[in-house]
Structures are given as structure tokens and as C-alpha cells.
Image: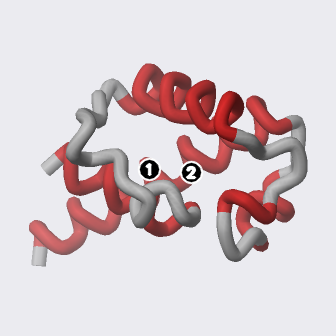
Amino acid sequence: DVTIAVRLAATEEARNALVAVIQEVLAVDEATVRAAKTLRDLPHYNSFRLVEILAAAETRLGITLNDEDITPTTLHDLDSLTTAFTNKNT
């Protein structure tokens, strides 16, 4: 189904962009980002870096999250953050 393929491509694009942003902001390698169970598990991660990650991801993806999109669940791990950006794009 074309709709599913488009959705999967958007999800993968968002995930890859987020991985790249997290790598840049936290100065860690891709494997470390992808292996982290939560964002808090990442080296150098803190609330200030989270703000940088969100701002850079919004710029890179051309998607702005609003207050309702940013919840403790959304900010838990790479998958939930990817979902927030992907859902905002649909």
C-alpha cells in the first residue's frame, strides 16, 4: 500500500535526522545513539542539550512541535521522539 510506504519513509527520514542531530549536539557516534534505551542514557545528555536537540531537529525536518507534542513520553527515547515528529508531519 502506497500510504504505508510513504509513512515508513517519513518515519525513517525523521529517525535518521534525529540520530544525526543527537550525534552533533552530544558529540557521540551513531551506534551509541541507536543503542541507547532512553535519551537519558546518552553521554552528555541534559535538559539544555535536549532543547538544542529539539531546535535543531525542528529546523532540519521543517516541523515545529508545540507544547502538546512535547511530553515526558515523547522525550523518553529515540522511537517516541521520532513518532512525535512523524505524527506532526502527517
Cβ atoms under marks 1 and 2 closer than 8 Å: yes
Q: Along the horizontal axis of the image, is 67 left or right of 49?
A: left
**Amino acid type shown at disc 2:** Asn
Residue 16 circle label: 2
- x, y (%) of residue 36? 75, 69
| 10 versus 44 height, above or below | below
Residue 13 circle label: 1
Q: Residue shown at 80%/54% (left/top)?
A: 30
- x, y (%) of residue 82? 43, 57
For residue 10, say whether it is visible: no
SS state under label 2: helix
**Amino acid type shown at disc 1:** Glu
Q: In which quarter of the image is residue 33?
A: bottom right
Label 2 environment density (alpha carbons within 10 Å; few <14, some 14–19, many ≥20): some
Q: Residue shown at 62%/37% (left/top)?
A: 50
| 87 versus 23 height, above or below | below
- x, y (%) of residue 3? 10, 67
Q: Quadrant of residue 68?
A: top left
Q: Along the horizontal axis of the image, is 87 left or right of 10?
A: left
**The one of 57 and 72 positioned closer to us in this rendering:** 72
Q: Residue shown at 77%/41% (left/top)?
A: 23
Residue 89 circle label: none
